[in-house]
Amino acid sequence: MAAAKRIGEPVLEVRDITLSFGGVRALLDVSLEIRAREILAIIGPNGAGKTSMLNVINGFYHPQEGTIAYKGRVRQRMRPHEAAEQGIARTFQNVALFRGMTTLDNIMTGRLLKMRRNFLWQTIHWGPALAEELEHRVFAERIIDFLEIESIRRTPVGQLPYGLQKRVELGRALAMEPELLLLDEPMAGMNVEEKEDMSRFILDVNDEFGTTIALIEHDMGVVMDISDRVVVLDYGRKIADGSPDQVRRDTAVIDAYLGVAHEA
Ligand SMILES: Nc1ncnc2c1ncn2[C@@H]1O[C@H](COP(=O)(O)OP(=O)(O)O)[C@@H](O)[C@H]1O
Ligand SMILES: [Mg+2]
């Protein structure tokens, strides 16, 4: 249960980040931390800089100012594959899967980082490589069980409804065995039942594997239900940071959401 959960020290510290695209300031002097084993929600109106923040954290974007420390070490210009190797996995606002490939094969792509043996080595010594591949398949099947998607394991993901595609994408991220999982609008476009399922899986991942999670979400009901802490961005600035209850009562947050200038 959430009450028994022990939230630890920060695993990721973002300090004074500024990110611009030409004249557009996506992030302005933003600092935040993500603490071990917490579920942090990042919220804010469209264009607030939420996706940009995840892109900075996993090395897609390189900010002009500021620093990021991961597990106590300040890192310079980390690239996405390096972030992944160090245990940061993510999903995308618009599902980014291989549409022609099955659920199982998409989840297997999340194991690629874990596969030690390269292709040349495999053609020479196919025995051990085969055994290793089998191990990864077993792991992928465990994720499929966990996410309750056995019935679609052989279905090309392009044929799946959107809600299930989002679940497969979560599966691929979990296949990387991340320490820090970044989810960009994991429930966008879902119906109520699909949102409940996804909320439960996110809570289970956090609870059973101790995975630290930062997620962007628009549904305030979901945010209040599953997050330990909430950071609010507005026009690239952080305007609030606190418990769901504190943030819900914050006047700057209420203004940002009810303000007139936020037609996306
Ligand atoms: N690659 C990019 N090139 C140019 N502008 C960008 C890029 N990514 C984001 N932006 C701009 O940065 C601002 C924040 O965008 P984004 O981080 O996607 O917001 P959110 O996810 O909160 O809706 C927007 O004005 C957006 O147009
Ligand atoms: Mg976004």
Image (tube, rainbow, N blue to C red):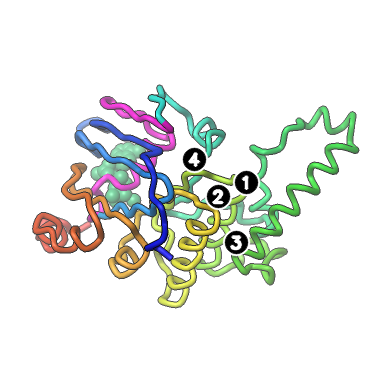
Please give left or right for residue 170 compared with residue 234 in the image. right
- The tag earlier along the polypeptide, 4 or 2, is 4
Above or below — where is 233 with respect to 198? above
Residue annotated with mark 3:
158
Crowd band around label 4 with a 10 angstrom C-alpha radius: few (<14), some (14–19), many (20+): many
Q: Which residues are magenta?
A: 44-71
Crowd band around label 3 with a 10 angstrom C-alpha radius: few (<14), some (14–19), many (20+): some
- Residue 230 occupies quadrant: bottom left
| Amino acid under disc 3 | Gly
Instruction: Give SS at disc 3.
Output: helix
Q: Is residue 9 rendered magenta in the image?
A: no
| Amino acid under disc 4 | Ile
Above or below — where is 48 with respect to 146? above
User: Any mark on residue 121, and which?
Assistant: none
Kindly identify the residue that appears in the image at 30 percent across and 65 percent down.
Answer: 224
Crowd band around label 1 with a 10 angstrom C-alpha radius: few (<14), some (14–19), many (20+): many
- Badges 3 and 4: C-beta atoms under 8 Å apart? no
| Amino acid under disc 2 | Ala
| Horizontal and vertical percent position of residue 182 | 43, 48
Residue annotated with mark 2:
173
| Camera-side mark, 4 or 1 | 4
Quarter of the figure that contains the C terminus: bottom left
| Camera-side mark, 1 or 3 | 1
- Residue 186 occupies quadrant: bottom left
